[in-house]
Image (tube, grey):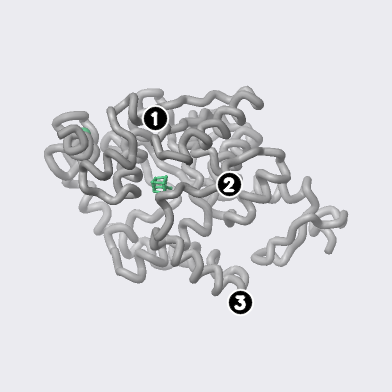
């Protein structure tokens, strides 16, 4: 197979695009997909300060690298979750990328910052680990971005992630989530803008990007992810994609174009009832936000 762009021998094929690429042209392809996502969804402008949530995995490191290559003003944020056999190593990959490239990495250690790690906090608060983890990440990323004066928080959610979440939300008709499942959530009410610049790239592409760009990343998934229902949705979508390349893209981008506006009123009405958390000032529908309630229960 030959590279679609320069006709040199291809090192990777992307079936969704019915194309092969050589190393240089594949890296170019990935940057172009990110550039297009940023432009199409008006994620941020040149000169905006962007904070990338870096886990040490392929997606977030590829995102950080691509945004830097595209000339954006971007720092990394690493959150130490205190998960045994995972977190220490993930921090090493995030730090080594920053050291090698001279990029700035902001670090928050959850046990130091709030007094508990994810497994302990989740157990004490009677929450599933991923639910306590997701809540903590959303809260601490937003707070760090607001404190640091950043214009946007970027996360490494890729096309496979977004299609799997969409699949789950449609299976259960979780309409309030469908209204918020967008590649950009605007700033407002104390929330910093959230963007997902990798929505046009699949996880096979972000892994290949790291390998071809010489970026070491943590290959092992978090041990807490085992049994996560999104993994099952990913398997189902992979089987469909195998039969019919391009299905995930058509599913997700078709939703954004044709169906997502139908669900935004419901999500917007929830936003109207926000007030400030009595403890931390974060916008919330109750008196105390879910993160402060988690911290409280984990310390009881
Ligand atoms: S890090 Fe956290 Fe994930 Fe681990 S505990 Fe679950 S949510 S699986 S992306
Ligand atoms: Zn709070």
Distance of label 2 from label 3 (alpha carbons): 27 Å
> Picture coordinates of residue 58 (x, y %)?
58, 45
Task: Give the quadrant of residue 233.
Answer: bottom left
Residue at (58% x, 46% y) in the render: 219
Circle 1 residue: 145
The disc, 1 or 2, on the residue closer to the chain's N-terminal end is 1
Using the numbered discs, state the Cα–Cα distance from disc 3 to disc 1 in whole angstroms: 42 Å
The earlier-in-sequence mark between 3 and 1 is: 1
Q: Is ligand 1 less than 8 Å from the beta carbon at label 2?
A: no
Do we see residue 156 in this rendering? Answer: yes
Q: How many residues crowd mark 1 within 10 Å: few (<14), some (14–19), many (20+)?
A: many
Q: Residue 113 placed where, x, y %?
A: 32, 25
Which residue bears the numbered disc 2?
A: 219
Quarter the C terminus occupies: top left
Callout 2 environment at 10 Å: few (<14), some (14 to 19), or many (20+)? few
Label 3: state its secondary structure: helix
Number of other residues with Cα within 10 Å of mark 3, as a class: few under 14, some 14 to 19, many 20 or more: few
Residue 37 in the image, given as x and y percentages of width and height? 55, 49
User: Depth-wise, is mark 3 or mark 1 nearer the camera?
Assistant: 3
**Is residue 208 placed above or below 233 in the rendered structure?**
above
Q: Is mark 1 within 8 Å of ligand 2?
A: no
- Read off the residue under disc 3: 243
Q: CA distance from mark 1 to mark 2?
A: 27 Å
Badge 2 or badge 3: first in the primary sequence: 2
Going by the image, does 32 lie left or right of 90? right
Q: Nearer the viewer, mark 1 or mark 2?
A: 2
> In the visual, does 108 lie left or right of 17?
left
């Amino acid at each position: 197979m030959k590279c679609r762009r320069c006709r040199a021998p291809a090192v990777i094929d992307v079936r969704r695009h019915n194309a092969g690429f050589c190393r240089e042209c594949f890296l170019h392809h990935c940057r172009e997909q990110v550039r297009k996502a940023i432009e199409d969804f008006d994620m941020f402008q040149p000169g905006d300060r962007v904070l990338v949530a870096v886990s040490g995995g392929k997606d977030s490191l590829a995102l950080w690298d691509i945004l830097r290559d595209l000339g954006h003003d971007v720092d990394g944020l690493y959150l130490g979750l205190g998960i045994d056999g995972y977190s220490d190593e993930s921090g090493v990959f995030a730090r080594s990328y920053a050291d090698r490239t001279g990029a700035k990495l902001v670090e928050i250690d959850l046990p130091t910052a709030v007094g508990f790690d994810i497994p302990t906090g989740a157990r004490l608060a009677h929450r599933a680990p991923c639910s306590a983890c997701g809540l903590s990440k959303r809260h601490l990323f937003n707070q760090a971005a607001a404190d640091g004066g950043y214009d946007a928080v970027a996360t490494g959610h890729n096309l496979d992630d977004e299609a799997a979440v969409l699949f789950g939300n449609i299976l259960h008709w979780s309409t309030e989530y469908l209204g918020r499942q967008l590649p950009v959530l605007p700033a407002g009410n104390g929330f910093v803008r959230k963007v997902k610049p990798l929505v046009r790239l699949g996880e096979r592409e972000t892994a290949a990007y790291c390998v071809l760009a010489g970026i070491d990343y943590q290959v092992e998934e978090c041990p807490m992810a085992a049994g996560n229902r999104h993994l099952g949705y990913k398997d189902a979508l992979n089987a469909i994609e195998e039969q019919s390349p391009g299905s995930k893209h058509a599913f997700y981008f078709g939703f954004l174009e044709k169906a997502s506006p139908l669900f935004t009123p419901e999500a917007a009405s929830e936003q109207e009832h926000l007030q400030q958390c009595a403890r931390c000032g974060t916008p919330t529908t109750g008196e105390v936000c879910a993160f402060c309630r988690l911290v409280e229960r984990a310390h009881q």
